[in-house]
Image: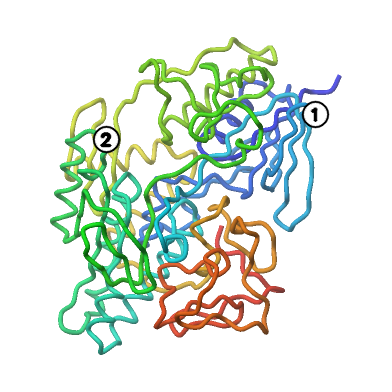
Amino acid sequence: MSRPRVVIVGAGFAGYRTAQTLSRLTRHRADIVLLNPTDYFLYLPLLPQVASGVLEPRRVTVSLTGTLPGVRLVLGEADGIDLDGRTVHYTGPEGGEGTLSYDRLVLAAGSVNKLLPVPGVAEHAHGFRGLPEALYLRDHVIRQVELAATTEDPGIRAARCTFVVVGAGYTGTEVAAHGQLFTDALVRRRPLRGGSRPRWMLIDIASRVLPEMDERLSRTADRVLRQRGVDVRTGTSVKEATPDGVLLSDGDFVSTRSLVWCVGVRPDPLAEQLGLPMERGRLLVEPNLRVPGRPEVFACGDAAAVPDLEKPGQYTPMTAQHAWRQGRTAGRNVAASLGVGDPAPYRHRDLGFVVDLGGVKAAANPLGVPLSGPLAGAVTRGYHLAAMPGNRIRVAADWLLDAALPRQAVQLGLVRSWSVPLDTTSPELPRMPGRPHGGTAPDGEHPPTPGRAAPVSGAPVSGASAAAGPGGRPAYAEPAVPGSARPDEPAAPRPEHPVEGIS
């Protein structure tokens, strides 16, 4: 008798935990297949430390095949689901297509960058959802500071050393906090002319930073940011992004070469094509994470609108904490549907939050007890080490090295600005020349082939094809042609030899 097959789509917090739990409970009595674009689980909360040079990229990636015994990994992106035929269609990393049949399906596709209808943002901003974006931002920040150190024009120098982060939630706050420390360290080693100092701005329409968290955490984070010199502007939004900078809602125009978009996330659009009841882009599920009317289908994490039994009438927010715990419940309930154990509804009460502000500073409220300073920093790092499913010793070693040695400020040049467009359904993959997958913009355009002219400064280009980011400015034109480059960025890879980047 053949074993039932369980297909899990996505290996984020929810998908990884589902596979881990299911493998432990079924003990080879089920064929567990994990479909994911990469061969690693990404520990997102530490991504700002990758962008600021504290951690090496592989420290925040955990091998799927090395930590999930009894689970078969299939590399690819799900692009179609036939609920009646019980199959999942996917496209592999080299363009090949395949189909997976299932007896049970777990949708844990996660989320992508949240877009707002702000003119110029898609062309001139980059998100912060995947490893390629973090690697790009690290290179970009180093490059801007290095170029600022050599320019004689004070206006250009100030623009290069101004970094605008939009969104003062969890991610944006940490990016700004770590970024200010990182650029200050760069300038100490190579001072700028006239005693200039890098300027980081944190912008949010909300009345305070970390608006979704306890006010005491918000006040602590706000105080630390301002003490470091971060320009925190609440009650403010971006009205327009241009090649020269950003126009704010208060009328102020900020000259910058760097716009980091951290306004939040939206569910992966995969579930929208199923024709099932949705709640703001998320698939409606029962408390046991089953999809109504489809007892063989489960959904969890950012892809699912899970009823919050602690707050009747509401749904659990899209956080890693909920996704991780929903994955465990999904694994148990899928196992129960196969005759192993009993099903149970998802119920969880938050035990607190931690926000890493870089150095020894953090804001935390474990079990509702507000903490700040070095004690909060120790609790925060302890929490991350305990939560990571692997690489704990390597992460701790990098933290020790960062405390004792200066950071290595070099550009790797492996991820180009056009390969990490803001408007992408695959932030975990860099966009490749001439390939229809791996972070391609929705309109299907790719970097033009060699021989076609690159857009010059001021020329109208498609935001999707140019994918201009923080470095794409008129005075220093962003290359849209692989093989051509602007003066401040290495040449792009040729289509026949795409660079995959670090993973």
Badge 1 local density, few (<14 within 10 Å), some, or many (20+)? few
Left or right? Give the position of 489 relative to 499.
Answer: left
Left or right? Give the position of 314 relative to 378.
Answer: right
Left or right? Give the position of 24 relative to 318.
Answer: right
Report the front residue among 323 and 283. 283
Residue at 54%, 34% in the rendered image: 303
Q: Which residue is mark 1?
A: 85
The mark tally for this picture is 2
Label 2 SS: loop
Above or below, comparing residue 59 to residue 8 in the picture: below
- Of the numbered discs 1 and 2, the one sitting upstream in the chain is 1
Label 1 SS: loop
Residue 1 image offset from top left, x and y in percent: 86, 19
Residue at 58%, 42% in the rendered image: 269
Residue at 67%, 21% in the rendered image: 26
Q: Which residue is mark 2?
A: 213
Q: Mark 1 is on which residue type? A: Gly
Report the front residue among 337 and 62. 337
Above or below, comparing residue 413 to residue 207 in the picture: below
Above or below, comparing residue 158 to residue 174 in the picture: below
- Disc 1 or disc 2, which is closer to the eye? 1
Q: Mark 2 is on which residue type? A: Met
Residue 128 image offset from top left, x and y in percent: 43, 54
Residue 33 image offset from top left, x and y in percent: 70, 35
* Distance CA(mark 1)–CA(mark 2): 43 Å
Residue 31 image offset from top left, x and y in percent: 74, 29
Quadrant the C terminus occupies: bottom right
